[in-house]
Structure formats: structure tokens, C-alpha cells
Amino acid sequence: MSGDIYIAAAGALSCEKRLQIISNNLANVNTAGFKMDQGQLKQIDPAEVPSQGGGDSGDLAASRAHLFWNNFSVYTDHSNGPLKQTDNVFDLALNGKGFFCVQTPDGVHYTRKGDFTLNSEGVLVTSNGWPVLGEGGEITVQGKENPMKNAIFNVDRQGNVAVDGKQVDTLRIVDIEEISQLSKAGDTLFKPPAGGVTEAKAEDVSVSQGFIEMSNVDAVKMMTEMIEVMRGYESYQKIIQSADETYSQAINDIGVL
């Protein structure tokens, strides 16, 4: 395969991957706490490209191929999403950098999705049942008479949790230094790598009770990018088709590449 077709095919594949990312972002435009993904291309270092001295054109194209197939990567945009008021006392949103800590069967995970609730034991949990962590561990809401019905649950802007006016714990809100090492684990949870990450107490962050943070996906921008990507993909297809026709004609009419 010729070098120009390699380049065009790599561009087409990058467009396919970008389209997959955009489609997933749009599917989660209304998902609370969702962080959109972005694709980026690696700039090719001219020093890595083999010189044209030595070898025929076919060998040269093959030797350069790896430079064009592995130039696309994905990263997560952790910018804040807009807040939506719900007036539910168990809905909590973060203003600024930081994550809530959640205890899962696979260890501590992190999230910005604050639509919490109470389980049957009065423990503050996520929508899928994982305990939300405070500085002292799991946060249990116990009222004067009934753990759920008569307790007055309040969280101030510093994350201090009070039940019936008495502070019981402080939300464990952390900032992650190696945020790029976090990977998505489903349901807006972020999983640390096997070696762990460095947690730091989140600074310049406040908690809003009765609010949830919505997705940071800009639907209009995503639709615009989708149109752009589809047009780019069509262009690469035309380049591949044109190059293929050119080489086919050379084979048929001239007999050499």
C-alpha cells in the first residue's frame, strides 16, 4: 500500500474514532456529573520519519506506516458542568475542582455526580448503592426517632454534614494531582490506576445542597463537530478512492507502480 493511502486511511480512522467519542458525548448530554471525552492527534516528529535514501518506495511506505496509525489519543475534559437546582436535600454539587469519594467493591472511586440517597440502613449512598465517604468513613444519617423520616439532613458549603443540627462528619472531597491517570468506570465514576493516585484536600471548592452538577457536554458544539468530522471522513474516502484509481490505471496502462 502506498504512503499517501496510509496517511488518508489513518485520517479516516481518526475521524471514525472522533465520531464515536462525539456520539457518546451526545448520548450523555443529560447525564448528571458526566465529563465529556475529547480526541487529539499526536504531531509527527520529522526526526522520526525515515529519509528517502535507500530502499524502494514500497519499503519506505511500510517503514513509515506506524507513524500514521498510532497518532490518535483520547482524554477526558474535567471542566465543570452547569448546576441544576432540585431542592432535594440529598443532592449535592461541587463548585470548583474536586471529587466526592465513593467506596466500591473495587476500592475508592471518584465522582462529581451528587444525586445521593439513603439506603435501608440510613447510609448516604450513590444512585447505584455505593457508600459516599466522609472523613470518618461511611456517613450514617440517624434522626431522633427514625433514621430516615425525622432526621434533618444538612450540608454546609464546607462539606460539613449535620443531622438534626449536630455535625456527624465532613464529606471527603479530594483533588487528584494525576487527574489524567483516572479512567472511567461507568455511571460517572472514575477509577484510579493500579498504583493509585495522590489525593490532596480540595481547596477553593464549595458544596451546594439541593443542586446537582449536570453534564459538561455542549450539545450545539458537539453537533457542529459531528458535521465537520463527517465531511472530513468523506474527504479522506475520496482521497483513497482517487489514489487507488491512479495506481490501478498505472498498473493497467504502464505496467509499473
Image (tube, rainbow, N blue to C red):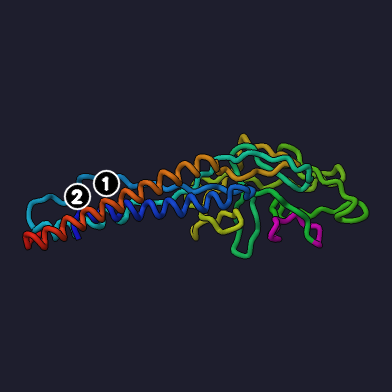
Measured Cα–Cα span from mark 1 to mark 2: 8 Å
Give whichever of 103, 233 is nearer the camera.
233
Indicate left or right for 93 with 58 as reference. Answer: right
Residue 24: % across, % down: 52, 53
Write the residue at 65% across / 55% down.
102
Question: What SS does tag 2 mark?
Answer: loop
Query: Is residue 59 placed above or below 219 in the rendered structure?
Result: below
Indicate left or right for 18 with 34 as reference. Answer: left
- Residue 156: image quadrant is top right
Q: Residues within 10 Å of mark 2 (few under 14, many from 20)?
A: few
**Disc 1 or 2, which lies upstream in sequence?**
1
Write the residue at 72% across / 41% down.
211
Query: Looking at the figure, which quarter contains the N terminus?
Result: bottom left
Query: Looking at the figure, which quarter contains the C terminus?
Result: bottom left
Give whichever of 135, 101 is nearer the camera.
101
CB atoms at circles 1 and 2 under 8 Å apart? yes
Q: Which residue is mark 1?
A: 44
Indicate left or right for 134 with 240 as reference. Answer: right
Question: What SS does tag 1 mark?
Answer: loop
Q: How many marks?
A: 2
Residue 38: % across, % down: 46, 47
Residue 14: % across, % down: 36, 52
Q: Which residue is mark 2?
A: 49
Residue 222: % across, % down: 50, 44
Q: Which residues are magenta?
A: 120-131
Q: Amino acid at mark 2?
A: Val
Write the residue at 39% across / 51% down.
73
Q: Residue furthest right?
A: 145
Mainly helix, strand or loop, the magenta region? loop
Indicate left or right for 38 with 129 as reference. Answer: left
Q: Is residue 121 magenta?
A: yes
Q: Is residue 123 magenta?
A: yes
